[in-house]
Structures are given as structure tokens and as C-alpha cells.
Image (tube, rainbow, N blue to C red):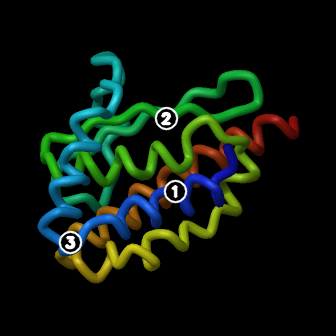
């Protein structure tokens, strides 16, 4: 499924909730369903800089697609990274690098997060795109 299609699905899912408390609860549930990162990748080098809580992110290339795994020590942040993984994992590096991530604004996520969490979210996206860019470059050599 394309990144745009996944984003559309997420926007539709968030539209089902009446208020932000329900949306936060949904994010927490998403975090609980996050496939756990292998313990060997829970190292300082894989911690996303700019996040208030600790978020570990690992990227692998499988075939011609980038597959991410992650974990966080905070339940809401775990939900945020789960949302990003759902959107960007198992996609081609080019598609990840060029993804507009417009669903974040469409569901009102940035404005309903604390400034530090919003910055952390941007750091997650930046790191995921950085990994994709690195894998994209590796393919060209």
C-alpha cells in the first residue's frame, strides 16, 4: 500500500474520534501493538536525538524496501513512532524520502502535542527519512 493511501486511512481513523482524549488513547493502543525492536538495537547510536523520551529506531533493507523497528520508554511516544512506522515502513527509500507526511497536520497532531513532543515527532520523521536517504545512496553505488 502506498504512503499516501496509508495516510488517508489514518486520517479516516482519527476522524472517528470525538475528542483528543480518545485520540491520545488510540495512540497509546497503537504503541502497544508496535512490534518490539530487537534488544541488540536498543543502543545509544539508535536513540533519536531531539526526543524528550528515549526512542530507539532501527532500519533494515529487505529487498528494495526499508523496514523500521522501534521502541520508546514513554507510552505516548511509543504510539507516535508506531504511527510513523505504519506510514513509512516497508516502503521504497525514494517514496520515504519524498513523503509529505501531510496527515500529521490533517489529524491535528502537531497542535495537540506539547512543543517538546512535536519536536520529537519531527526528529522521528527526520531520522526515518535520513535512513531511507542513506539506503537510497547505497543503492546508487
Distance CA(mark 1)–CA(mark 2):
20 Å
**In the displayed structure, would residue 111 be above or below residue 54?**
below
Label 2 CA crowd tier, 10 Å (few <14, some 14–19, many 20+) = many
**In the displayed structure, would residue 14 be above or below residue 109?**
above
Residue closer to the observer: 69 or 22 = 22
Q: Quadrant of the N terminus?
A: top right
Label 1 CA crowd tier, 10 Å (few <14, some 14–19, many 20+) = some
Label 3 CA crowd tier, 10 Å (few <14, some 14–19, many 20+) = few
Residue closer to the observer: 108 or 136 = 108
Which secondary structure, mark 1? helix
Q: Position of residue 120 (x, y in %)?
A: 30, 63
First in sequence, mark 1 or 3: give its number: 1
Q: Quadrant of the C terminus?
A: top right
Q: Is residue 134 left or right of residue 105?
A: right
**In the displayed structure, would residue 10 be above or below residue 118?**
above
Distance CA(mark 2)–CA(mark 3):
23 Å
Residue 35, can we see it? yes
Distance CA(mark 1)–CA(mark 3):
26 Å
Q: Position of residue 58 (x, y in %)?
A: 44, 33
Q: Which residue is mark 2?
A: 68
Residue at the image point whose x is 18% and y is 72% from the top: 20
Disc number at residue 9? 1
Q: Please state which of the two labelled residues, at mark 1 or mark 2, is closer to the viewer.
A: 1
Which secondary structure, mark 3? helix
Residue at the image point whose x is 46% and y is 43% from the top: 85
Disc number at residue 116? 3
Q: Quadrant of residue 72?
A: top left
Amino acid at each position: 500500500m502506498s504512503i499516501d493511501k496509508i495516510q488517508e486511512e489514518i486520517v479516516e481513523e482519527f476522524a472517528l474520534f470525538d475528542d483528543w482524549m480518545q485520540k491520545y488513547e488510540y495512540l497509546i493502543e497503537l504503541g502497544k501493538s508496535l512490534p518490539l525492536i530487537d534488544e541488540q538495537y536498543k543502543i545509544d547510536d539508535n536513540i533519536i536525538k531531539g526526543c524528550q523520551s528515549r526512542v530507539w529506531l532501527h532500519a533494515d533493507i529487505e529487498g528494495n524496501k526499508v523496514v523500521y523497528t522501534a521502541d520508546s520508554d514513554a507510552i505516548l511516544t511509543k504510539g507516535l513512532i508506531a504511527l510513523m512506522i505504519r506510514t513509512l515502513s516497508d516502503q521504497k527509500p525514494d517514496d520515504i524520502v519524498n513523503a509529505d507526511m501531510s496527515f500529521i497536520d490533517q489529524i491535528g497532531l502537531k497542535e495537540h502535542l506539547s512543543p517538546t513532543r512535536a519536536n520529537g515527532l519531527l526528529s522521528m520523521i527526520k531520522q526515518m527519512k535520513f535512513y531511507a536517504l542513506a539506503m537510497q545512496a547505497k543503492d546508487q553505488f
